[in-house]
Amino acid sequence: MMKKLGLCVRYDCDNYGSMLQIFATQKAIIDVGWTYEHIRYDKKTLIFLIKNLTRIFNPYFMRGKILGFKKANCLKKYPEIQQSNAKRKTMIEIFRQKYIAPYSPVYKGFHNLVKGADNYDAIMVGSDQLWTPAGIKSKFYNLLFVPDDIPKIAFATSFGVSEIPDSQINETAKYLRRIDSISVREKQGAKIVKMLTGRKATVALDPTLLYTGKEWKQFFSFKREVQEKYIFAFFLGANAEHRKAVNQLAEKTGLKIVTCPFMDEFVEIDMSFGDIHKFDVDPIKFLNLIRGAEYICTDSFHGSVFSILNHKKFLTFNRFSDNEKQSRNSRIDSLFSLLGLESRRFSKSVDIYTTINTEIDYKTVDHRLEELRKKTWLFLENALKEAEK
């Protein structure tokens, strides 16, 4: 009988990269011979809310809430954009229903979540930024709900930040010590684990990178979303200088700019930035917009990942300033360092047209990726083998 894994991931997130990352995680689990189930946890009980009132003083938690509130409030002023944005959310939900499954019953409250853990042979927290300081109190992604006797695995999980706030060091060390097999997505994450626990964590690839661009085309076939040649500008942040640089690239190339605006926040400049605004985009169409583009300019981690997998001419922009405490640049820094792609970071001190047209040695990149894939597959196989004992 196949062993069953309980999977803790952000399956309810309206984000292209997160959806594709969960899809890849599911496939990887099946490929190593286990079954899985997404654990659904409804933590919004009165007890939870009372115990976690201190979250309002957590700047990492509040930043996301404030951005979401501002976006919803701003969109009310533009009913047409609000309607288009709602359509996009519906398309992502259709993708989720079709490709992200199966699910557990909904465990209402922490007590029922703890009891539900007994339904699994092991429990794994998936990839993406699930250990950010914003979520320290939930006891879900850090697997604090899992009893001692059930194996616990972290698969390419990310802290999302370069350092843990002083106020959270003890709590973070506590949950890390309980996890039997730890892999993280960034080199900085491995340093955090080492510093807090003395343990060596494997630096693993984001699951989307476990499969080649060719394999992704077998999962989701390529279809052109825009018939003419174009630059795909996929920005989640609000930096006006980044848009200005893409406009300069468009002037030099004569190409149209395609955007998917207002994903994470409302950025007023995006109402006029770009020539073609795409809202009718699900994760598959997002993939195809990258595949079909002449150039990609992005501040998105997964926008960068799929540019690499499809051997595109691309530049990645810093979504956060490096001195910002809530910066999440480290995941891109780590990946580019591992693959030798440091030159693909945008700098306003150089000409964007010259930089983006500088040839990328994708033969070397693919070789490095293959070595990292072997290491990541080995971690996953060994972690699940240990869980079977």
Image (cartoon, rainbow, N blue to C red):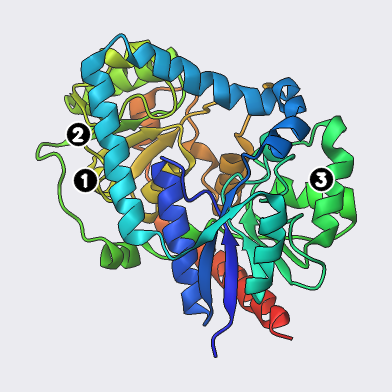
Residue at the left extreme of this rendering: 227
Secondary structure, mark 3, is helix
Task: Report if the CB atoms under discs 2 and 1 are less than 8 Å apart.
Answer: yes
Tag 3 residue: 172
Tag 2 residue: 230
Residue 166: % across, % down = 86, 31
Q: Image quarter for residue 380? A: bottom right
Residue at the spot x=74%, y=31% of the render? 50
Quarter holding the C terminus is bottom right
Q: In the displayed structure, would residue 364 be above or below residue 28?
A: above
Residue at the spot x=42%, y=18% of the render? 71
Residue at the front extreme of this rendering: 46
Q: Nearer the viewer, residue 311 or 289?
A: 289
- Count of numbered tags: 3
Residue 152: % across, % down = 72, 66
Amino acid residing under circle 1: Gly
Disc 1: CA contacts within 10 A as few (<14), some (14-19) or many (>=20): many
Q: Nearer the viewer, residue 346 or 226?
A: 226
Tag 1 residue: 292
Residue 338: % across, % down = 60, 53
Closer to the eye: label 3 or 1: 3
Residue 141: % across, % down = 66, 51
Disc 2: CA contacts within 10 A as few (<14), some (14-19) or many (>=20): many
Secondary structure, mark 1, is helix
- Label 3 and label 1: CA atoms lie apart by 42 Å
Amino acid residing under circle 2: Tyr
Q: Earlier in the sequence, mark 3 or mark 1?
A: 3
84 sits to left or right of 113: left
